[in-house]
Image: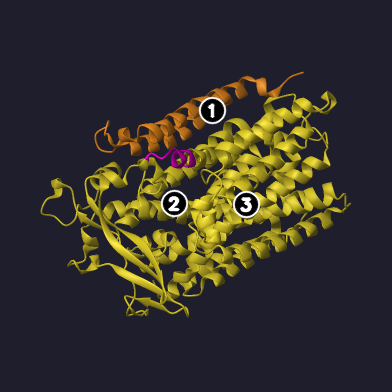
Chain colours: A orange, B yellow
């Protein structure tokens, strides 16, 4: 029987999902266990707390666009 | 604080509410079937649906609660933004397409698509109602908070106004009118928050909000006497003798030495300058004696660098107590898992024609919602330093920030915030109405109804839910709305997500497993919340030390519990009860 969860599009979606989970879990790990790192300013102006937070929002949009692009391809 | 009623605000507000109700009546005249009432014929364009997702999701908690939390506590409010948006990744990559393929009108349709089980319909309908009611509370509280400064009316009037307006919207044209109200609201909210953020950047940072002198930093005390009289610094509160608005920059970074203003700043420049500034926030301390309850608001000088990192609201992140850290982790897990489990979000997938449209509308939703959450950071920090904050109400931060620019903007932002509540509450009432009429009455009780009767039953349920929402909005007045929404996410994630995910990915899932997971997840998270230290302190008014649970947010325990229960019960169920991927229409 064909399982719709095994289609290439769904597999790609799930792979992108796990990429985001890793980014989100990384952020949580820093907040919970190394909050001192969040005050650092690795990119000059803003601190890591702001940069990582904004990055997670941007990553959500970027990955969703990526999935749309590849699904259209399929 | 006491607020002056603005006729302009009143006019804009009346135009907004009158407009959306008029639109609803217009759409309602076009004739209604059950398919139209519950799913807008399944013909909504994906872009409209995507913005309507934003209108549905960006609730009072997002707009009023997060801005207020950032304004009062700094970065921690932004953590809610991050968690709320992250949940959409689960919705897009895991849930969107299957839920569209499996369901028809309600979330219960999807979970029951392979079983035809009354037990599943009953459990999921109850869980939908519980989640919707918990989500309704903060929306109604936010409505009441808005009405006080906007119209100068008591809090309860705002709650009743929203309740009546939303009930009218839902009963006139169901999902069709709800979709358009949410589309209009989503568009306006993101656009005007962008305008407000642009004004904040253009103003830059200004020492003492441009006011001369140091007298504004004197502590101020609000007393509520035994007979209910409100005193400010010992004298009766009046428009001439009221609490002063607060929240200012004390000192700018060294690079602006000798200046009282930075002038216009670019987005990242603004955050960097704020990080290097000294800011005055106001902390309350409460004292109770024979005269009444005294709350003293005193200024606290804080470095920007401390306000722009976690720990201002979630104190456990800095004290290092394990229970506090677990509480925070639990909340962030619930926000991540909760979005894709919210019934009022899930039913929006039935309003588009196919899985591709469901996917595209989710991406549009993520774009609009993500943009909005970036703006909340600027709105919250702008409010923190605007000199316009009401020290007694964090929920009023965004409208009062707008007021610091102009009364017209205040009127527009307040009216949009009010419309925000209308959009979200109408979605929640729709979800609850479907759960009662379609799941409980039709499918569980087996009442046979004509198409017309199904719609009428849904409308009656909507009226009932509207009344419940009004009562709860008045009862829970003093809560921060973001805090309350955290509860709704916990219950949704614990009750619904395990069943939904396992149904999609584990063929051995049985109907008994789903019923048990939904029931246990819902009851466990609900019981945990009712026994939590936060509830003891803020609802029951007793010491938080008496709470028997180690931390307040249940998700860290109850979400895995839902998965475990589902697996355990499914393995113990007869193999014949297992799910087979048959899809929609197999009921």
Q: Which residue is mark 1?
A: A17
Q: Nearer the viewer, residue B397 or B421?
A: B397
In this rendering, the label closer to the viewer, 3 or 2: 2
User: Residue at horizontal 46%, vertical 56%?
Assistant: B64
Q: Is residue B454 left or right of residue B199?
A: right
- C-alpha span from label 1 to label 3: 28 Å
Image coords of residue B380 (percent x, y): 37, 53
Q: Is residue B533 left or right of residue B295?
A: right
For the stretch drawn in magenta, the main secondary structure is: helix
Image coords of residue B435 (percent x, y): 74, 50
Crowdedness near tag 1: few (<14), some (14–19) or many (≥20) residues, C-alpha within 10 Å: many
Asked where in the image residue B118 lies, by quadrant, the reply is: top right
Residue B534 visible to an observer of this rendering: yes
Q: Which residues are magenta?
A: B320-327
Q: Which residue is mark 3?
A: B179
User: Residue at horizontal 72%, vertical 28%?
Assistant: B568
Q: Secondary structure at mark 1?
A: helix
Mark 3 touching mark 2, by CB under 8 A? no
Q: Which residue is mark 2?
A: B66
Q: Are marks 2 and 1 on the same chain?
A: no
User: Residue at horizontal 71%, vertical 60%?
Assistant: B462
Image coords of residue B127 (percent x, y): 69, 47
Q: Secondary structure at mark 3?
A: helix
Mark 3 or mark 2, which has the lower sequence index?
2
Q: Secondary structure at mark 2?
A: helix
Q: Nearer the viewer, residue A39 or B40?
A: A39
Residue B103 visible to an observer of this rendering: no
- C-alpha span from label 3 to label 2: 24 Å
Which quadrant holds the N terminus of chain B? bottom left
Q: Chain of mark 1?
A: A
**Residue B321 magenta-highlighted:** yes
In this rendering, the label closer to the viewer, 1 or 3: 1
């Amino acid at each position: 029987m064909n399982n719709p969860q095994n289609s290439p599009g769904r597999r790609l979606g799930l792979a992108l999902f796990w990429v985001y989970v890793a980014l989100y879990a990384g952020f949580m790990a820093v907040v919970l266990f190394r909050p001192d790192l969040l005050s650092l300013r690795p990119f000059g102006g803003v601190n890591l707390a702001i940069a990582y937070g904004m990055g997670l929002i941007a990553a959500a949009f970027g990955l969703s666009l990526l999935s749309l692009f590849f699904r259209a391809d399929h | 604080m006491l607020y002056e009623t603005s006729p302009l605000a009143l006019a804009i507000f009346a135009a907004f509410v009158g407009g959306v109700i008029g639109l609803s009546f217009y759409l309602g005249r076009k004739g209604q079937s059950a398919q139209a009432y519950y799913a807008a014929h399944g013909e909504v364009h994906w872009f409209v649906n995507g913005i309507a997702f934003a209108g549905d999701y960006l609730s009072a908690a997002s707009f009023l609660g997060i801005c207020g939390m950032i304004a009062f506590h700094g970065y921690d409010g932004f953590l809610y933004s991050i968690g709320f948006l992250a949940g959409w990744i689960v919705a897009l990559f895991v849930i969107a397409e299957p839920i569209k393929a499996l369901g028809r009108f309600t979330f219960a349709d999807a979970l029951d698509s392979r079983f035809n089980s009354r037990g599943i319909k009953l459990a999921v309908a109850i869980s939908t109602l519980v989640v919707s009611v918990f989500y309704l509370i903060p929306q109604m509280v936010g409505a009441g908070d808005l009405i006080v400064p906007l119209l100068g009316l008591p809090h309860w009037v705002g709650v009743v106004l929203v309740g009546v307006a939303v009930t009218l919207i839902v009963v006139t044209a169901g999902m069709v009118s709800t979709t358009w109200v949410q589309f209009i609201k989503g568009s306006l909210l993101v656009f005007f928050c962008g305008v407000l953020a642009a004004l904040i950047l253009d103003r830059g940072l200004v020492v003492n909000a441009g006011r001369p002198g140091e007298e504004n930093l004197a502590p101020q005390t609000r007393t509520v006497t035994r007979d209910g009289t409100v005193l400010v610094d010992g004298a009766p509160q009046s428009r001439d003798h009221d609490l002063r608005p607060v929240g200012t920059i004390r000192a700018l970074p060294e690079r602006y030495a000798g200046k009282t203003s930075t002038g216009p700043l670019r987005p990242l420049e603004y955050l960097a300058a704020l990080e290097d500034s000294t800011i005055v926030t106001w902390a309350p301390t409460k004292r109770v004696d024979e005269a009444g309850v005294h709350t003293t608001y005193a200024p606290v000088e804080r470095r920007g660098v401390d306000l722009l990192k976690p720990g201002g609201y979630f104190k456990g992140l800095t004290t290092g107590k394990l229970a506090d850290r677990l509480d925070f982790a639990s909340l962030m897990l619930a926000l991540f898992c909760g979005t894709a489990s919210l019934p009022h979000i899930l039913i929006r997938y039935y309003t588009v024609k196919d899985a591709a449209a469901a996917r595209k509308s989710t991406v549009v939703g993520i774009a609009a919602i993500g943009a909005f959450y970036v703006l909340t950071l600027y709105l919250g920090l702008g409010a923190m330093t605007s000199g316009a904050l009401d020290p007694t109400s964090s929920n009023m931060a965004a409208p009062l920030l707008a007021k610091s620019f102009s009364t017209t903007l205040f009127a527009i932002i307040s009216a949009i915030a009010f419309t925000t509540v209308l959009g979200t509450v109408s979605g929640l009432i729709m979800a609850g109405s479907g759960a009662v009429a379609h799941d409980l009455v039709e499918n569980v009780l087996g009442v046979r109804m004509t198409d017309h009767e199904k719609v009428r039953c849904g409308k009656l349920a909507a009226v009932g839910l509207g009344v419940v929402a009004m009562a709860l909005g008045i009862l829970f007045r003093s809560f921060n709305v973001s805090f309350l929404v955290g509860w709704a996410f916990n219950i949704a994630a614990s009750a619904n997500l395990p069943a939904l995910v396992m149904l999609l990915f584990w063929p051995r899932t049985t109907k008994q497993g789903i019923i048990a997971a939904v029931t246990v997840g819902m009851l466990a998270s609900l019981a945990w919340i009712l026994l939590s230290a936060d509830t003891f302190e803020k609802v029951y008014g007793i010491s938080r030390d008496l709470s028997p649970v180690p931390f307040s947010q249940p998700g860290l325990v109850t979400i895995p519990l839902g998965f475990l229960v589902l697996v355990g019960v499914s393995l113990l169920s007869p193999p014949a009860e297992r799910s087979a991927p048959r899809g929609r229409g197999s009921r």
